[in-house]
Image (cartoon, helix red, strand yellow):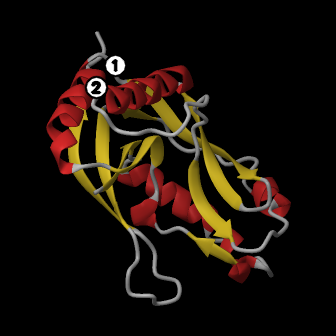
Amino acid sequence: MRLFAAVIPPPLAVDELDRALTPLRAFPDAKALRWTGRPGWHFTLAFMGEVDDELLPDLRARLSRAAHRTPEFPLRLHRGGRFGNRALWIGAAGGIEQMRLLAERADAAARRAGVSMEEHRRYQAHLTVARIRDSGDLRPYVEALDTFEGTPWEVDELALVRSNLPVSGVPGERPRYEVVDSWPLEAAG
């Protein structure tokens, strides 16, 4: 199955983000963007791709240990950014170093469980909100999100998420995400 480790924002943060994006979806060229939906909003920590079923027990055990070794930390959705002119994202603020550490631990857990991972690179916390097939000017969207500040929350869980890719061929169909397991982070104090 196709898997990744993630932090999933709570409903309050998702509601705030949805309200912040509503005016952007009305921009003149907004129809050229493929907007991600609320069910797909997450911070990917470690993308694993296709994982063989026989690796799952060890992967789950290692992710559980990674979560247990990581204290809860504060986070909030914060401003917007872009990857070139191909993807629009929302960033994070607060416990960024703790989030980076959790991402590194999730990546290491997958590698040690035998999952073939991409080349390791420094983690950048982002939640993708839109993509564009052909390059477009995303600067107006980033500028509109420049003052966006979400309400802080405590990240208290590491999730293992299955990505179910579209198979129907229906234009606009999106991947479906399903949390297959989760582990609490170590409580602070």
152 left or right of 131 in image: left
Q: Residues within 10 Å of mark 2 (few under 14, many from 20)?
A: many
- Residue shown at the point (61%, 74%) measured from the top left: 34
Q: Position of residue 139 (x, y in %)?
A: 84, 58
Whether 97 is drawn above or below 182: the answer is: above
Give the labeled residue for mark 1: 70
Q: Quadrant of the C terminus?
A: top left
Q: Nearer the viewer, residue 165 or 53?
A: 53
As drawn, the residue found furthest toward the top would be 189
113 left or right of 14 in image: left
The numbered dot on residue 90 is none
Alpha-carbon distance for marks 2 and 1? 5 Å
Q: Position of residue 176 (x, y in %)?
A: 36, 68
Q: Residues within 10 Å of mark 1 (few under 14, many from 20)?
A: many
Labelled pair 2, 1 in contact (Cβ < 8 Å): yes
- Residue shown at the point (51%, 26%) measured from the top left: 100
The numbered dot on residue 67 is 2
SS for tag 1?
Answer: loop
Q: Amino acid at mark 2?
A: Ala
Q: Position of residue 80 (x, y in %)?
A: 69, 49
Whether 34 is drawn above or below 88: the answer is: below
Whether 117 is drawn above or below 164: the answer is: above
Q: Quadrant of the N terminus?
A: bottom left
Toward which corner of the image does residue 142 lie, by quadrant?
A: bottom right
- Residue shown at the point (82%, 69%) measured from the top left: 136
Q: Position of residue 14 (x, y in %)?
A: 45, 56
Q: Amino acid at mark 1?
A: Thr
